[in-house]
Image (cartoon, rainbow, N blue to C red):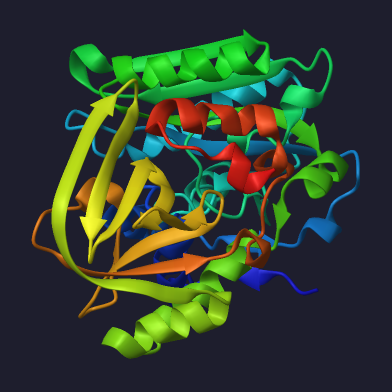
Amino acid sequence: MARIKLDENMMESAVFGGAVLGGGGGGWIEEGLQIGRLALELGEPELRTIDEFAEDDTFVTVSLVGAPGAKDKFLKPIHYARSLEMLARGLGKPISAIHTNENGAGTTVNGWLQSVMTGIPLVDFACNGRAHPTGTMGALNLTEVEDYVSHQTAIGGKGDNYLEFAVSGSLGKAASLVRKASVEAGGLVAVARNPVTAAYAKQNGAPGAITQAIGVGEALLGAKGEAAIAAVVDKLGGKVVAAGEVTEFEMETTGGFDVGNVLIDGFEMTFWNEYMTLEKGGERYATFPDLIMTLDAKTARPVVTAALQKGQQLAVIAVPREKLLLSSTMSNKALMQPVEDIIKKPILDYLF
């Protein structure tokens, strides 16, 4: 398959399509557009298929970690590239390709800037084809690999909050420390982490995730209003579950996460950065990693959880997990358990 030269239209489609696939998380649309445009100004990012790489080539994940709603978050473009360069120095071997950890408004284009700044190829792949709250959910099931040593670097913040952080250790400990570093940096850090072989990535992640996001974005941007929402659910094989006013909304930023719930048209949704559950009258309509997402009822613009407000008129869409490109982590019971602990609702019984 030919390599794809990424242009402005594809970038916008990737951001908006990624916003839908983010399921409420995955960063802000404006920030995704800003980073995407900067990458296009600095170079000509090119998307390569995973089949172009040898099985033993080294892939590295680039990601954002933290709470999109944090008031003191601060990232500069150089932070994205510097975290990758720090990791490369620590590894002591060449990095064959980089990829994002998940689809999301800001995250689908994560890696484009690093690729043009460092010359490291960008691969059409994500650890997970939708957004997820924890670092281990975006770690390609490496929690199941005995004695795997996770290498991670994180940079972010300004002034007294500025932080450069590198850690090597067990995956859980490293991810936890990077999450804490995001809090110390004001809420958000640019991260490079978890080198794996291309063969391992292909087996445990989501090849084609970026082109899927671009396709969803093209469907969204190719129409207006209700027609755009219809085009998106048709593209993904989902449905519009509800539409109406945000009548209740609560959110708390704690431990580097946005946690809360929202009520729309009598439907209650919980979120932990991303939407976790959708239910009404005791009936569960969707459960993470099913995709649950809110879009402006008039403009069809995706609305992430950190941007929710009372009085908004929103449509709620749901897409079954079987229609998504998902990581093997999404069927790992141990990695799903924390969702129940945070949102105080049953999850596992709906999944396993």
Q: Residue at x 56, y 50 (%)?
A: 289
Percent of width and height locating residue 143: 72, 23
Residue 282, relative to residue 71: is it above or below?
Answer: below
Snapshot quadrant of residue 226:
bottom left
| 46 lies left or right of 134 | right
Q: Residue furthest front?
A: 281
- The residue nearer to you, when weighing 40 against 204, is 204
Q: Residue at x 66, y 27 (%)?
A: 334
| 304 lies left or right of 109 | left
Q: Residue furthest right?
A: 55
Percent of width and height locating residue 160: 20, 12
Q: Which residue is drawn at 44% across and 21% down?
A: 179
- The residue nearer to you, when weighing 281 against 97, is 281
Quadrant of the image containing the N terminus = bottom right
Snapshot quadrant of residue 4:
bottom right
Residue 96, relative to residue 192: is it above or below?
Answer: below
Q: Residue at x 76, y 74 (%)?
A: 2
